[in-house]
Amino acid sequence: MTPLPKRKLSKGRRDRRRAHDALTARNLSVCSNCGEMRLPHTVCPKCGFYKGREVVSMEKSEK
C-alpha cells in the first residue's frame, strides 16, 4: 500500500501551491503598417510586414 498524507491539506495551502498555474494573457503589439494586433517579433499575419518592410507577400482574396 502506498503512503497517504497524515492530515488533510487546507484549502489555503492547496491554493497557494496553485498560485502560479494561472494563464497569462499574450503580449500583443500594434502592426506599424496595418494597425492590427500581432505577436511581437513576428510577421504580421494580416499584411505580411515586419519592421517596416514586406517579408511575406500576402495575396488579397476577392469574394
Image (spheres, rainbow, N blue to C red):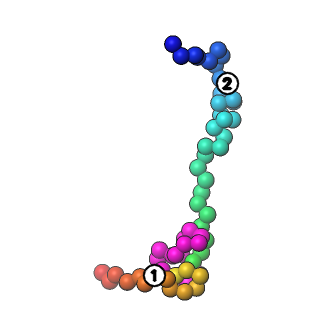
Can you identify the residue that label 1 sits on?
A: 56
Residues drawn in magenta: 32-48
Rendered location of residue 27, percent (x, y):
61, 63
Tell me if 44 is positioned left or right of 62 in this view. right
Q: Residue at x 61, y 43 (%)?
A: 21
Can you identify the residue that label 2 sits on?
A: 10
Sequence-first tag of 1 and 2:
2
The disc placed on residue 25 is none
Give, as a three-letter code, the residue at label 2. Answer: Ser
Relative to 8, say whether 41 is above or below: below
Residue 46 lies in the magenta stretch: yes
Q: Residue at x 63, y 38 (%)?
A: 18
Q: Predominant secondary structure in magenta?
A: loop
**Which of 44/61 is in front?**
44
The quadrant holding residue 32 is bottom right
Q: Is residue 37 visible?
A: no
The quadrant holding residue 39 is bottom right
**Which of 9/3 is in front?**
3
Total marks shown come to 2
Residue 11 lies in the magenta stretch: no
Q: Residue at x 47, y 74 (%)?
A: 45
Q: Is residue 52 visible?
A: yes
Q: Label 1 to label 2, Cα distance in Å?
A: 54 Å
Give, as a three-letter code, the residue at label 1. Answer: Val
Disc 2 element: loop
For marks 1 and 2, give the one nearer the viewer.
1
Would you say the residues marked 1 and 2 are in contact, meaning their CB atoms lie under 8 Å apart? no
